[in-house]
Image (cartoon, rainbow, N blue to C red):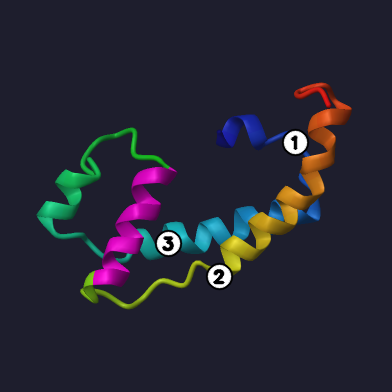
Amino acid sequence: MVQYLADKQLSVEACAVLDAGRELWQAYFAYTDERSVREEFKLNRADVGWYQIRNALKKRNETGDALPVDFTKFSDAYEVLSTKLRPLVYEYGFLKQ
């Protein structure tokens, strides 16, 4: 993904999502999850993705084992980007009205 994005010019909204995602990524790596969480979300695999990271961070928030992680900045940035992209789905023919 890094190589794919290297020559792309991202919108301000997309950059905001990427920056907020980086903060969550850093929070994820700042703490090692309990074994049960690592096994539940398969965190020891090389192909860990956003689903596993997001749910591991939410599980940390539920258990209180680490400092709480705030998803607000990411959620807000994602909503702004989604609102911008939603009409383009029809304009570029991904879906038909």
Name the residue at 77% across, 42% down. Answer: 86
Residue labelled with disc 2 = 72
Count of marks placed on residues: 3
54 left or right of 1 in image: left
Q: Nearer the viewer, residue 90 or 47?
A: 90
Which tag is nearer the camera, tag 2 or tag 1?
A: 2
Q: Nearer the viewer, residue 56 or 83?
A: 83
Q: Amino acid at mark 3?
A: Gln
The first of marks 2 and 1 along the sequence is 1
Q: Amino acid at mark 1?
A: Lys
28 left or right of 10 in image: left
Magenta span main SS: helix
Real-space Cα distance between discs 2 and 3? 16 Å
Real-space Cα distance between discs 1 and 3? 23 Å
Q: Quadrant of residue 54?
A: bottom left
Residue labelled with disc 1 = 8
The first of marks 2 and 3 along the sequence is 3
Q: Are marks 1 and 3 in contact (CB under 8 Å)?
A: no
Residue labelled with disc 3 = 26
Residue that extends furthest to the front in the rendered view of this protein: 97
27 left or right of 16 in image: left
Real-space Cα distance between discs 2 and 1? 26 Å
Q: Quadrant of residue 19?
A: bottom right
Name the residue at 68% across, 57% down. Answer: 79
Q: Secondary structure at mark 1?
A: loop
The answer to whether 74 is drawn above or below residue 95 in the figure is below
Q: Which quadrant would the C terminus be assigned to in this image? A: top right
Q: Amino acid at mark 2?
A: Thr
The answer to whether 10 is drawn above or below residue 91 in the figure is below
Q: In the rendered structure, which segment of residues is drawn in magenta? A: 50-62
Query: How dense is the environment of label 1, judged by Cα within 10 Å: few (below 14), some, or many (20 and up)?
Result: few
Which tag is nearer the camera, tag 2 or tag 3?
A: 2
